[in-house]
Image (tube, grey):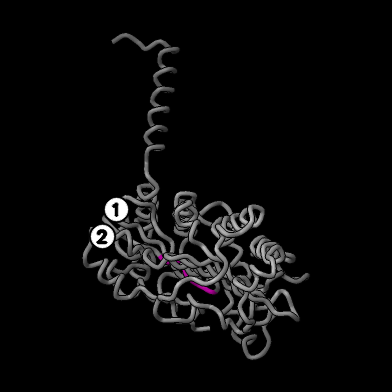
Amino acid sequence: MAAIEPGKKAFALLLLACLVAASAGAESLSERLDRAGAAWASSLRPEARAEAGYDFEDEERFDVHFAPIALEGLRLDAMTEAERSLVDELLAVVLSKKGLERVRHVRELEAAVGAMEGFPMSLVAPWFRDAGRYFVALFGEPGDGAWGLRLEGHHLSLNLTRGLDGSPPTLTPFFLGAQPRIVPEGLPNAGLQLLREEEELAGRLIASLSSEQRSTAALAYQDGRGHMLSQVDRALPTEAPAGVLLDALAPEQQTLADELLGALLSDFHPDIRSGFTDRSRRAELRFTYTRSAENETLLYFRLDGPDWRLEFDNTTDGDHIHTVLRSFAGDFGLDRLAGDPLARHLALEHARPPTNRQ
């Protein structure tokens, strides 16, 4: 057999690389997720897999917590370094770089929370406020139809569902919090303000509202998360969204509103984010807010539409923020399960805002 000339060999290798790259580029987000999920699941030691694994139809998939109590799954600090690395690779499929960093920062903030807490929480802080005390639960088998994954701990609940209809995966209910609001000097991550951009953009939008717009958008102030809808109620609300319609705002106000929406959804992969920002859904969004007259950091606002809601609340002590994103039809992948009657039935049966245990 004649030897391949070096130039032709190099060209053949380049062509093969291009074909492989093109093939990878054609891979859908859900297919990439299947591959990453299967890699993580197959890496788990048998005892770790037993701790993490549930059937996709298990009711545990719908038991979302807002407080780090009675959490289920495999603890991050119980994984090997290789297992944790593959979890990060899985999350990198569905989250942006910023989203991955924020998830890491939420966990790192536990050190600040533990250092700032007084008696009696200070007694359990070394165990309770632990960056490794976050739990991963796997529902179903990646690559075999619908499956899901939950990452949950203090100030974080990410509920991923890979559906059956070819659409991008879903991540709701999605809960992310920040405590403290700004990390004090002398503590790890001093100066970190995890939700600074969202808070500042909301403040600018509120300041831009006219008296007439405020009469539509403003709520009477309540502290203690008195206005939170998605966190407290057991059933999804059916009343029409309240607040000022974004499409009724002046152009410069609409730009601010779009920047705020973009910041709030910036943790997600663009394909997932677009499901909330496309023009048909954006047109019906409304903005409502309230803040304390004595302390402007005591702020609540929400972006509300006919099929999803995003809330920001810092009304406990001004130093403890919760954000929650709910999709009324899409939580737990409900709208992605049309091909699985049992899974869809279970999702319909259990779809509801998480219990407020904090």
**At 34% from the left edge and 56% from the top edge, which residue is drawn?**
42
How many marks the image carries: the answer is: 2
**At 45% from the left edge and 12% from the top edge, which residue is drawn?**
7
Is residue 1 found inside the magenta-colored segment of the image?
no
Direction front: furthest residue: 212
In the image, residue 83 sits, relative to residue 225, either above or below, namely: above
Percent x, y of residue 18 = 42, 27
Q: Amino acid at mark 1?
A: Asp
**Camera-side residue of 203 and 342:** 203
Q: Amino acid at mark 2?
A: Ala
In the image, residue 206 sits, relative to residue 233, either above or below, namely: above
The local secondary structure at tag 1 comes to loop
For label 2, the residue is 338
Quadrant for residue 256, please give it: bottom right
**At 73% from the left edge and 80% from the top edge, which residue is drawn?**
293
The local secondary structure at tag 2 comes to loop
Whether residue 257 is visible, yes or no, is yes
Percent x, y of residue 246 = 56, 60
Q: Which residues are magenta?
A: 150-154
Give the distance between the C-alpha atoms of the residues marked 2 and 1, in whole angstroms.
7 Å
Percent x, y of residue 88 = 49, 56
